[in-house]
Amino acid sequence: MSVSNRVDSRLLAIQPDDHVAGAGTAPITVVGYCDFECPYCARAQQVMSRLLVRHEGRVRYVFRHFPLVHKHPLAEQAAEFAEAAAAQGRFWPIHDFLFTYQETLDLGDLFTYAGKLGLDVKRIEEEMARRAYAARVQRDLDGGRRLGVTGTPTFFLNDMRYQDEDEVARAVRRAA
């Protein structure tokens, strides 16, 4: 279902440390707030991947964290882990791993995934122990709340909010 109210597009401005897939100069930008434990988000990420391929060069996707810890107790930890992987230049491979294996997101599993992707596991263990990326995840969460995000997935195209990946996909196809 689409929520047809508009938001202040300045709140959607891409930040230097945002995770962006697709051409940086693409005329269409979709910003998505997602939770790595949310099964609806996993489905939505598949839709976004197909859109990026289908509209290559015309669409870019900005992923932002919105861990719903009251529903998904490991989502915040997974988001911090994704940021630790991002610090090693591997956000998107970990992003895909986390959605593929979202039923197994305890710390041991996360460190195993890091090793499989060739990350510095010791560094990630240390960063996770001191919660080095908690503030980064919280920034996304706070930004989402200012935009009226209450659940996941929630997407923004231009200044319109969508809570259904199929509706945002139709909006992208119309805009492309």
Image (spheres, rainbow, N blue to C red):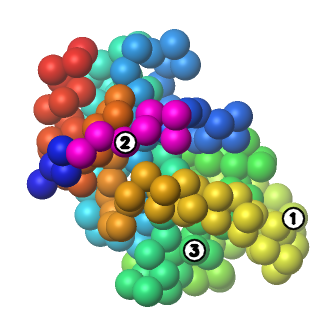
The region drawn magenta spans 5-11
Quadrant location of the C terminus in the rendered image: top left
Residue under the point 57% across and 62% down: 142
Q: Say which element carries label 2.
A: loop
Residue 4 position in % (x across, y down): 18, 44
- Of 129 and 69, nearer the camera is 69
Mark 2 is surrounded, within 10 Å at the Cα level, by few (under 14), some (14 to 19) or many (20 or more) other residues, namely some
> Which three-letter amino acid code belongs to the residue tagged 3?
Glu
Q: Say which element carries label 3.
A: helix
Q: Which mark is residue 123?
A: 1
Instruction: State the CA–CA distance, disc 3 to disc 1.
Output: 19 Å
Q: Which mark is residue 7?
A: 2
Instruction: Residue under label 3, please give it.
Output: 76
Q: Earlier in the sequence, mark 1 or mark 2?
A: 2
Residue 78 position in % (x across, y down): 58, 70
> Does residue 76 appear to the left or right of 58 in the view shown?
right
Q: Earlier in the sequence, mark 2 or mark 3?
A: 2
> Does residue 27 appear to the left or right of 54 in the view shown?
right
Q: Nearer the viewer, mark 3 or mark 1?
A: 3
Residue 16 position in % (x across, y down): 70, 34
> Which three-letter amino acid code belongs to the residue tagged 2?
Val
Whether residue 15 is visible: yes
> Which three-letter amino acid code belongs to the residue tagged 1?
Arg
